[in-house]
Image (tube, rainbow, N blue to C red):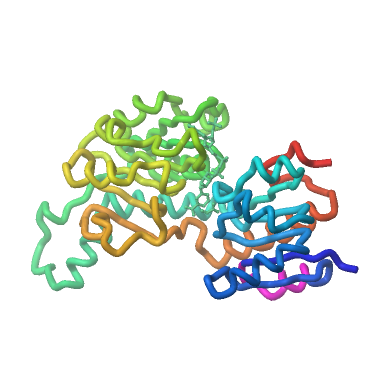
């Protein structure tokens, strides 16, 4: 008999077929209030699960007594109780390699759009405000040869540094807990304490995971360290930033603008002050949202699940200590 698995995000047809050849699959396009009870019921006999965007906590995992593999279609895994999985020796698989370059493109787009005010001036053109040669109130800020501060020089941070350094001649400074010799060799990147980085960078780009150490890492005191001419970009996770402090920093002119792919609450509430600020570019968590990257992520997650279910994991495991 084929092992039972539950998929809780719609997969491309060929990948769904690949799973069905090996497993008995209970598939949900997504989890909604209407089908949540069915999802939980299906967990009772699930040996594997694959999906995205759901909080998989200890309580939910208790509904899955025979679970032995979990595969998320994402790089981030802050929505999982990793300790609860590790205690039960269940590997958690993720898809970092499939989206790195695409997310770096997105961050570079946020840098360009905020610095050059692309969205704001395009909206003004549409509103019929372009009536002659443009004056200073249409001007933006240079990107090339400025200083980019990267908080989180991991896979995505490195791909971003490559674009900024070689494409735009930017000076790269970065913060991580451990130094990154590859970044230092390839991009002449300079490792800095976080507070120092915030005080020197023209574009502060945050691409950190969310965990207890990073939650609200960037707060009012830290925004106060930034230059009033500097821009803040976040594509890591919303709660790494104290969003109320960010809003205040933007309202007070403590910083020049922000480009945001992630928020403390997603979708961003309609009444968020961020939505009415001309110097803010807010996009709907689309870091990896291209046809190519989303397919590659789904394909990687399917392969990851098969590897975990067949005791043949070679990489992409968040808690490798559980591998037999
Ligand atoms: N917006 C989007 O669509 C996407 C967002 N993401 C987010 O981006 C995150 C990063 O992805 P990726 O680059 O692949 O991950 P990596 O694990 O490759 O990189 C994470 C980096 O963060 C650093 N880091 C971790 N904790 C701290 C800390 N407390 N202080 C300073 N630096 C720290 C790590 O270095 P060190 O350990 O030395 O500190 C490492 O350089 C994901 O976890 C996810 O949350 C990912 C994909 C898409
Ligand atoms: O935010 C997206 C991810 O893959 O992580």
Q: Is residue 58 left or right of residue 209?
A: right
Q: Residue at x 51, y 42 (%)?
A: 209
Per the picture, the main secondary structure of the magenta-coloured stretch is helix
Residue 236 percent across, percent down from the top left: 46, 46
Q: Residue at x 57, y 54 (%)?
A: 99
Residue 286 percent across, percent down from the top left: 46, 60
| In the image, residue 18 above or below residue 239 | below
Residue 163 percent across, percent down from the top left: 46, 45
First to last magenta residue range: 9-19
Q: Is residue 249 left or right of residue 181?
A: left
Which residue is at the front of the view, 324 or 62?
A: 62
| In the image, residue 211 above or below residue 119 | above
Which residue is at the front of the view, 109 or 2?
A: 2
| In the image, residue 121 above or below residue 317 | below
Q: Quadrant of residue 306?
A: bottom right
Residue 75 percent across, percent down from the top left: 58, 50
Dividing the image into 4 quarters, which one contains the C terminus?
A: top right
Count of numbered circles on the image: 0
Q: Residue at x 72, y 61 (%)?
A: 302
Q: Is residue 311 left or right of residue 301?
A: right
Q: Quadrant of residue 44?
A: bottom right
Residue 204 magenta: no
Q: Residue at x 58, y 70 (%)?
A: 30
Dividing the image into 4 quarters, which one contains the N terminus?
A: bottom right
Which residue is at the front of the view, 147 or 98?
A: 98
**Which residue ends up furthest to the right in the rendered image?**
1
């Amino acid at each position: 008999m084929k092992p039972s698995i539950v998929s809780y995000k719609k997969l491309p047809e060929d990948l769904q077929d690949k799973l069905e050849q090996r497993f008995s699959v209970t598939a949900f396009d997504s989890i909604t209030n209407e089908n949540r009870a069915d999802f939980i019921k299906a967990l009772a006999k699930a040996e594997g699960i694959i999906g995205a965007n759901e909080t998989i906590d200890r309580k939910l995992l208790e509904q899955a007594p025979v679970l032995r593999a979990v595969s998320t279609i994402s790089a981030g895994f802050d929505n999982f109780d990793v300790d609860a999985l590790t205690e039960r020796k269940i590997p958690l698989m993720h898809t970092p390699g499939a989206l790195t370059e695409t997310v770096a493109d997105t961050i570079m787009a946020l840098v360009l759009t905020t610095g050059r005010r692309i969205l704001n001036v395009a909206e003004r053109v549409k509103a019929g405000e372009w009536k002659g040669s443009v004056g200073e109130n249409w001007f933006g800020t240079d990107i090339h040869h400025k200083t980019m501060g990267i908080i989180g020089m991991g896979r995505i941070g490195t791909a971003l540094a490559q674009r900024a350094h070689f494409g735009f001649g930017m000076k790269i400074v970065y913060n991580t807990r451990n130094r990154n010799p590859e970044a230092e060799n390839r991009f002449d990147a300079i490792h800095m304490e976080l507070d120092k980085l915030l005080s020197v960078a023209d574009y502060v780009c945050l691409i950190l995971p969310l965990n207890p150490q990073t939650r609200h890492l960037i707060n009012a005191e830290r925004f106060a360290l930034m230059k009033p001419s500097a821009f803040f970009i976040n594509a890591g996770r919303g709660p790494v930033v104290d969003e109320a402090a960010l809003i205040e920093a933007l309202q007070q002119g403590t910083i020049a603008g922000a480009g945001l792919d992630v928020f403390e609450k997603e979708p961003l509430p309609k009444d968020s002050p961020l939505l009415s600020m001309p110097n803010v570019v807010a996009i709907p968590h689309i870091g990896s949202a291209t046809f190519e990257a989303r397919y590659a992520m789904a394909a990687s997650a399917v392969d990851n699940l098969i590897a975990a279910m067949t005791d043949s994991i070679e990489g992409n495991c968040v808690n490798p200590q559980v591998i037999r």
